Image (cartoon, grey):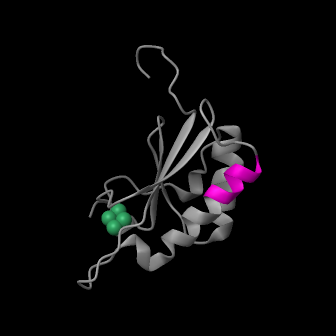
């Protein structure tokens, strides 16, 4: 936080699980639920879950669908486009565990809906 107060969670990751039925792209078409479940499970198993540590949450559309499937980590505001389970494993291992951003999975700047 900008006032120097530590954030409640060290890393708070949100997975877009939005599902569209009108034919437009949405993250749920790319197994976002599976990625969310895996992340949650890995964070819990690693003992990372809880205040001062990591929280994994579901989200609706984050309005960057063209880069989907999307996850975003706060307070750093790091946006990820992941593809498979290995990507989730790397986000957990590198970013959520060690604070090191996974550069290769960053959502390109300017990607919107
Ligand atoms: S549907 Fe996932 S960011 Fe919009």
Which residue ends up furthest to the bottom in the rendered image?
23
> Of 5 and 100, which appears nearest the observer?
5
Give the percent coordinates (x, y) of residue 89.
Answer: 69, 60
The residue range painted magenta reads 40-46
Q: Is residue 74 left or right of residue 83?
A: left
Which residue ends up furthest to the right in the rendered image?
46
The quadrant of the rendering that contains the C terminus is bottom left
Give the percent coordinates (x, y) of residue 93.
Answer: 72, 50
In which quadrant of this rendering is ligand 1 seen? bottom left
**Residue 66 position by quadrant:** bottom left
Name the residue located 60 percent from the left edge and 44 percent from the top edge: 101
* Residue 99 against residue 15 in the figure, above or below: above
Instruction: Verify whether residue 76 appears in magenta.
Output: no
* Residue 19 against residue 37 in the figure, above or below: below
Q: Main secondary structure of the magenta part?
A: helix
The quadrant of the rendering that contains the N terminus is top left
Name the residue located 59 percent from the left edge and 32 percent from the top edge: 51
Name the residue located 76 percent from the left edge and 52 percent from the top edge: 45
* Residue 96 against residue 66 in the figure, above or below: above
Give the percent coordinates (x, y) of residue 52.
Answer: 61, 29
> Of 4 and 38, which appears nearest the observer?
38
Q: Is residue 20 left or right of residue 7?
A: left
Name the residue located 65 percent from the left edge and 41 percent from the top edge: 100
Give the percent coordinates (x, y) of residue 35.
Answer: 57, 67
């Amino acid at each position: 936080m900008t006032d120097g107060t530590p954030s409640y969670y060290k890393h708070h990751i949100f997975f877009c699980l939005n599902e569209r039925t009108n034919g437009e792209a949405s993250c749920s078409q790319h197994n976002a639920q599976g990625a969310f479940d895996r992340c949650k499970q890995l964070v819990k198993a690693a003992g990372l879950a809880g205040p001062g540590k990591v929280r994994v949450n579901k989200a609706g559309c984050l309005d960057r669908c063209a880069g989907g499937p999307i996850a975003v980590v706060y307070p750093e505001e790091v946006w990820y486009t992941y593809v498979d389970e290995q990507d989730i494993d790397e986000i957990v291992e590198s970013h959520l565990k060690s604070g090191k951003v996974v550069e290769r999975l960053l959502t390109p700047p300017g990607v919107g809906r």
